[in-house]
Image: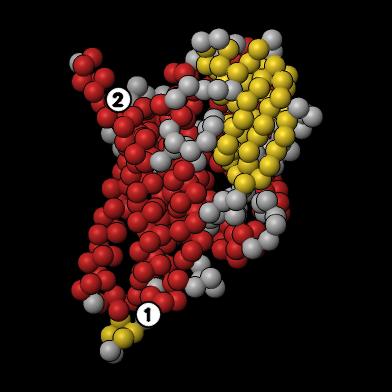
Amino acid sequence: MNFDFSDDQKLLRENVRSFLAKEAPLAVCRQVLETATAYATSLWQAVATQGWLGTAIPENYGGAGFGRLELAVIAEELGRVLAPIPFSSSVYLASEALLVAGTDEQKRRYLPPLSRGEWIGTVAHFEGPGDPGNRPVKTVVRSGKLTGVKMPVTDGDVADFALVTAKSGRDLGLAIVDLHAREVQRERLDSIDPSRSLASLRFERVPIEWLGGRPCGSDTVQHIFNRAAVLYAFEQLGGAQRAFEITREYTLNRYAFGRPIASFQALKHRLADWYVELELTRSNCYYGAWALSNEAPELAVAACGARVAATNTFELASKEMIQMHGGMGFTWEHDAHLFYRRARYLAAVLGPAPVWRERLITCLERREQAS
């Protein structure tokens, strides 16, 4: 079994990296972070023009008609530049949810403007800190109207619509909500990474329609999150890899006592350990990409493994980057804190690593019992 990308996909990676090197240097991320701007609108428009928003959307719904492997390639490259755009919310979550569970009419209505970048979508799931899987969902739908509060919601302040997890009786589903409706109140929240926005959404009997025409059930909701976890993992891998490359270059060119600091045992062993973690994470991500692109039964296990490995590795990378740059790494002017902020942000958007580790254990136990 070959888990490597094809020559065409590697060429795509080269083209995407070359494009982002010109359009999305780290200065773009810093500019959004240091201003009141919600996201880089010019970069968003450029990405939409490239057709990346519709990478995995079929052509009959206005997309490019490629697969999840191509989308994984793009996700990793966007992670490398810490792209300050709502790509993950709109593509990994909203578009994927519509493709998995939407009706044909919903796909025809929502996917074309999503693929063109005219609309931004998101998924609203959390209702405060902690693991939502360990407590009942309080957001409810009664008589076709949704009431409740969701927070934090990624890109909830800029999204045009949200897929909101809600209960109807005992059934859990995803309710499609127009976030411009007067019954919706939005408030931007403080984030550890201001280059990627978070919001609180309050719904007061707002009209909805169910994704798929009816509540899809908790298994479908988790399946959508598993799919998103693989793509988020590639974004985290890209950030961790770029942090490693920047740090390695610095330690090779920074001299102390007449020799590169990378030659000091205390640093070169840490760099070696860091490299090993990157490659192990890459293996987990590739396994997840294979499972996602082939709709394999192993997707749940692969997604949990990729999510846990990528979250831990990006956090490790961001901390090592700061420490190995010495006193300079702790300053506002250095880019190291941009990677730390993004690592912490991505660690929380789908739930922290311990939550996914518990899911991995549960999936493995169920598989063992079934065998």
Residue 180 vs residue 297: left or right? right
**Residue 253, labelled with which disc?**
1
Which of pointers 2 and 1 lies earlier in the amino acid sequence? 1
Circle 1 residues within 10 Å: few <14, some 14–19, many ≥20: few
- State which quadrant residue 256 falls in: bottom left
Number of disc labels: 2
**Residue drawn at 49 percent across, 26 percent down:** 224
Visible in this render: residue 293? no
**Residue 154, labelled with which disc?**
none
Residue 322 at what x, y percent from top left? 40, 67
**Residue drawn at 29 percent across, 59 percent down:** 274
Q: Is residue 53 above or below residue 257?
A: above
Residue 338 at what x, y percent from top left? 51, 61
Q: Is residue 50 above or below residue 209?
A: below
Query: Element at badge 1?
Result: helix
- State which quadrant residue 154 falls in: top right
What residue is disc 2 on? 363
- Closer to viewer: mark 2 or mark 1: 2
Residue 146 at what x, y percent from top left? 67, 20
Query: Element at badge 2?
Result: helix
Residue 71 vs residue 187: left or right? left
Circle 2 residues within 10 Å: few <14, some 14–19, many ≥20: some
Q: Quadrant of the C terminus?
A: top left
**Residue drawn at 67 percent across, 54 percent down:** 40
Depth check, front residue: 313 or 10: 313
